[in-house]
Image (spheres, rainbow, N blue to C red):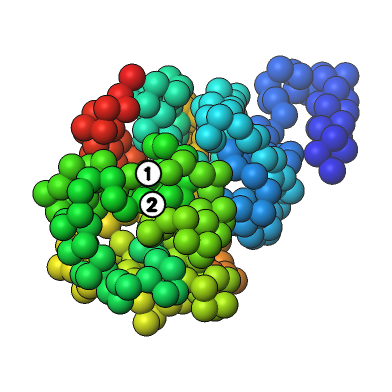
Amino acid sequence: MRTKSLKTLLAGAAAAVLAGGIALGAAGPAKAEYPERPVTLLVAWGAGGGTDTVARMFASLMEEELGQPVNVVNQTGGGGVVGHVAMANAEPDGYTVGIATMEVTVYEALGLADIGPDSYTPIYRLAAIPAGLTVKADSPYQSAEELLAAIKEQPKGSFKSSGCGIGCAWHFAATGWMQSEGLDPDTILWIPSQGGAPALQDLAAGGLEMVTASVVESRSLLEAGEIRALAVMNDERQEAFPDVPTLKEATGSDWTASTWFGLVGPDGLPETVVQTLQSAAADVYASDKFQAFMAERGYVPVGETPEQFQGFMEQQSSQLSGLIEELGLAK
């Protein structure tokens, strides 16, 4: 349709020139509106995981808003570094964007990659998944308060936890909680794993005393009665798990922790493109389909504008950089 319109315009202009009426240079072709071709949505984590699940639902609804295909591409490796670097290094034209996660706020401090919040154009923060606190079904600790009391009584390293590798969201959930209680951040011995699923299996088998991965990831084992959820590290209870108290309700602690998902582009994305993507993302976020999707899975809706999203990333980067230094992980 666009090609036909351009040919028609040029033909008409040429005819006018021949007729001695209008100079061809007096008018040019209409400026193309973004997007005029498919958009690639990068995901730094594997297919089937939490980020990928959010990205694919989001992409399917964004297609309806943008009128162009939105293709999810998984670029994995290096604990999310590969995909997040690709998002930062993409051409700033709006045709390659990504779903960033909290790890972009710690890569630089950990010495894993020279990228941080300023490497991106924030567009819209969609959702978060709070950290949880789970134990084996037959654990002697019936509440988060009892577990915390035991951690304080035992020597450092007596309790083991997991949920991901060193320096990921669930690691900081555990270390930050300890720090907020006036304990050394490494009071709980962190056992690196390939993710929440294997850590939870290890918990159910008795290899760990606790896991700080999200209750969302714990759902199947919770329903099977193999583990118990003691708390969620969130300001409010999760809609999908109404019987699980917040950490504040359980222990009085104000500590919260989560991973999150936000739409970003590379630094320098044109304002007109940002406005188009933000508007479309806000409509997707507010849709019944997306809200139902999040509620069903236990995701916490966020809905932050670019300015709010940027401020959030900078605040989290500053907070976690201090924690990384205390843990001796800073590079």
Vertical order, 222 against 313 (above or below):
below
**Residue 327 vs residue 138, the one in the foreground:** 138
Q: Quadrant of residue 187?
A: top left
Residue at image location 52% in from the left, 73% down from the top = 226
Neighbour tally class for label 2: few under 14, some 14-19, many 20 plus, Cα within 10 Å: many
Vertical order, 293 against 181 (above or below):
below
* Name of the residue lying farthest toward the bottom: 243
Residue at image location 39% in from the left, 21% down from the top = 111
Q: Quadrant of the C terminus?
A: top left
Three-letter amino acid code at the position of disc 1: Trp
Q: Is mark 2 on a helix, strand or loop?
A: strand
Q: Quadrant of residue 21?
A: top right
Vertical order, 84 against 185 (above or below):
above
Q: State left or right for residue 86 relative to residue 8.
A: left
> Quick check: marks 1 and 2 in contact, CB under 8 Å?
yes
Q: What residue would you read off at disc 2?
A: 161
Q: Is mark 1 on a helix, strand or loop?
A: strand
- Residue 247 percent coordinates (x, y): 25, 66
**Residue 82 vs residue 147, the one in the foreground:** 147
Q: Quadrant of residue 9?
A: top right
Q: What residue would you read off at disc 1?
A: 190
Residue at image location 52% in from the left, 78% down from the top = 225
Q: Is residue 278 visible?
A: no
* Residue 254 circle label: none
Q: State left or right for residue 276 relative to residue 307.
A: right
Residue at image location 15% in from the left, 68% down from the top = 252
- Residue 86 percent coordinates (x, y): 59, 27
**Residue 305 vs residue 77, the one in the foreground:** 77
- Mark found first going from the N terminus, 1 or 2: 2
- Residue 190 percent coordinates (x, y): 37, 44
